[in-house]
Amino acid sequence: MKRMMQDNSVTIVGQTLLSGSALSFQDSQTRVSGPRWLNCVGVMLLWLSCLTLPTRAAVLAEDNPILVPPWLEDSLVYRNSFDNEKVAPNTNIENIQLVDGSTTEQSPLGLFGKGLALSGDKSFKLRSPVFSPHKPFTLSFWWALKEDAKIDTGFNLFGLTGNGYIGHFVRGKGEWCALQRPTGVCQVYYFKGIPNQNLLYDGDLASSLNLKANVWHHTAAVFRAGSTIEIYTDGKKATETHAEGRLFRPEDNLQQFECGPFGSGGYLDELTVFDRALSADVIGRYYSVISQMRALT
C-alpha cells in the first residue's frame, strides 16, 4: 500500500520513518514529520489508512482501531480495553471465558480511558485452550501500581495454570525470602517431565523501571516453538527461558490465565492475546507508538 498526503508540514509515503519535533517512531509503512499536533494526526491517519486491508473486519468492527495496529489485526483473538459494561471484551474470536470470581471492578485510571482495578487480593482470570504454550501465542497488557513500590513490594503480572504453572511476577524483601529488593521472576513449575525453573532477573527492578504510582508499563509474554518463553517489558526483552526435558503438550492443560493480585493495588488495561509469536521488533514498535500517543493526549 502506498498513500500520499502533503502540505507544508506533513508527508505520508511508503517506506517509512515517523519523526518530528516531539515524536520519533519507525514502522514499515510511513513517514510523518511536523509539529506535535500534526504528528498525532499522522499516526492516526497511518493506522486508519490500513483499515481497508483484508482483516477480521467483521469481528473487529466495534474495536478501537487506534490501539490495535493494522499489522497486528490478523492475529488478534482477544482484546479488552475494560471500557465496556461489566468489562466485556472488545474482541473475542476464540470465545475466551471470564472465570467465576474474577474481578470486574473498573477504574477511571486507565491507559487512555477506563481500566481494571486490581485491589487487594483481586485478580483478573480468563480460561481458554488458547493459553496452552504447546503452540505459539502472545500475551500483551499494560499495568500500573496504585502506590509507590517499596523494598517489600510484590505483585503477580501473569500466571498460566493447569497441570503445571508458568508465571511472571515481582517479589521484594520478605521474612521467608532472600531477596532484598523487588526482583523480576519467571517460573516454570510442576510439569511432569520438565524440571522446575525459578529464573530471577534484575535484582533491583525499581532502579531500572519507574515503579512509582500510576506509571504505566507494558508487558508481553511470547510463547514459541513449544518450549520458549520470552518476557518483554516496555518494548525490550527482559528475560527468556526454555522448557527442558520435553516440549509443552496439550495434555498439560494450561488453560487459565490470571493477572494479579497486585498486593497494595494496581491497574490493568489493554489486555490482548495474539495467536502467533510476535517478534521483538513488532513488540518494540507497538510499545513505542502507544507510548507516544499517550504522551500526546
Image (spheres, rainbow, N blue to C red):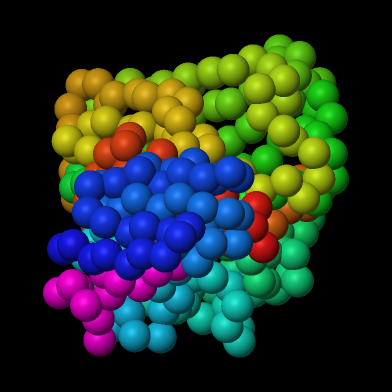
Q: Position of residue 251 (x, y in %)?
A: 21, 49
In this view of the protein, can residue 191 be seen by the observer?
Answer: no
Residue at 17% in and 36% down: 225
Residue at 37% in and 57% down: 11
The verdict on residue 243 being magenta is no
Q: Which quadrant: the C terminus?
A: bottom right
Count of all numbered marks drawn on residues in the image: 0
Q: Quadrant of residue 114?
A: bottom right
Q: Quadrant of residue 104?
A: bottom right
184 lies left or right of 138 = right
Q: Is residue 142 above or below residue 91?
A: above
Residue at 30% in and 71% down: 49
Q: Position of residue 154 (x, y in %)?
A: 72, 35
143 lies left or right of 31 = right
171 lies left or right of 91 = right
Q: Position of residue 282 (x, y in %)?
A: 32, 44
Q: Is residue 97 above or below residue 14?
A: below
Q: Which quadrant: the N terminus?
A: bottom left
Residue at 41% in and 47% down: 18
- Work out whether residue 148 or residue 225 is closer to the camera in this orientation and state it: 148
- Work out whether residue 265 or residue 68 is closer to the camera in this orientation and state it: 68
> Which portion, as a residue range, is magenta?
43-58
In this view of the protein, can residue 51 be seen by the observer?
Answer: yes
- Work out whether residue 260 or residue 249 is closer to the camera in this orientation and state it: 260
Q: Position of residue 124 (x, y in %)?
A: 58, 62
